[in-house]
Amino acid sequence: MSPQAFRTTMLERGARYVLETILLESKPVLFAARLDYDQWREQVARAAKLREEQVLLMGSAVTGFSLAPMSTAEHLHRSLPLTVRHLILT
């Protein structure tokens, strides 16, 4: 999804729709296949003693571009390092 399509969807459908159908359900662009993402989640969950459903990537890791309001929304490169900023336990 392009940055413009993402913005349009957010404006037309709302934040909850974007969260539930795009951010939570999509394969992050950092992974070549959904299986790769699922295996990564399993490994992180096991190491952190969490349930796999508690491990998610969000934001630019999913979309491939920055979601920051003031960003130029340029596409991210797969070679950039992944920064884990928050771990939310539910």
Image (cartoon, rainbow, N blue to C red):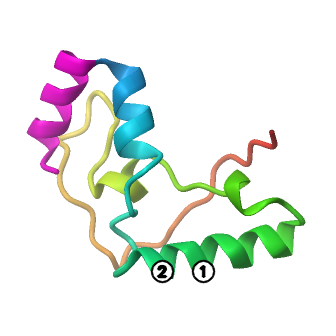
The one of 56 and 82 positioned closer to us in this rendering: 56
Task: Specify the label residue 35 is tagged with.
Answer: 2
Report if residue 48 lies within the magenta region. Answer: no
The span picked out in magenta is: 1-13
Is residue 52 toward the left or the right of residue 3 in the image? Answer: right
40 lies above or below 24: below
Q: Could you say which quadrant of the image residue 26 lies in? A: bottom left
Q: Secondary structure at mark 1?
A: helix
Q: Where is residue 77 drawn, in percent x and y?
A: 27, 71
Q: Residue at x 72, y 63 (%)?
A: 52
User: Given contact means CB atoms under 8 Å apart, are the residues at marks 2 and 1 in contact?
Assistant: yes
* Residue 2 coordinates in the image, percent (x, y): 12, 48
- The answer to whether 8 appears left or right of 62 in the picture is left
Of the 4 image quadrants, the one containing the C terminus is: top right
Q: Which residue is mark 1?
A: 39
- What separation in Å lies between label 2 and label 1 (alpha carbons)? 6 Å
In the picture, measured across the screen, residue 12 lies left or right of residue 40, that is left
- Say whether residue 8 is magenta: yes
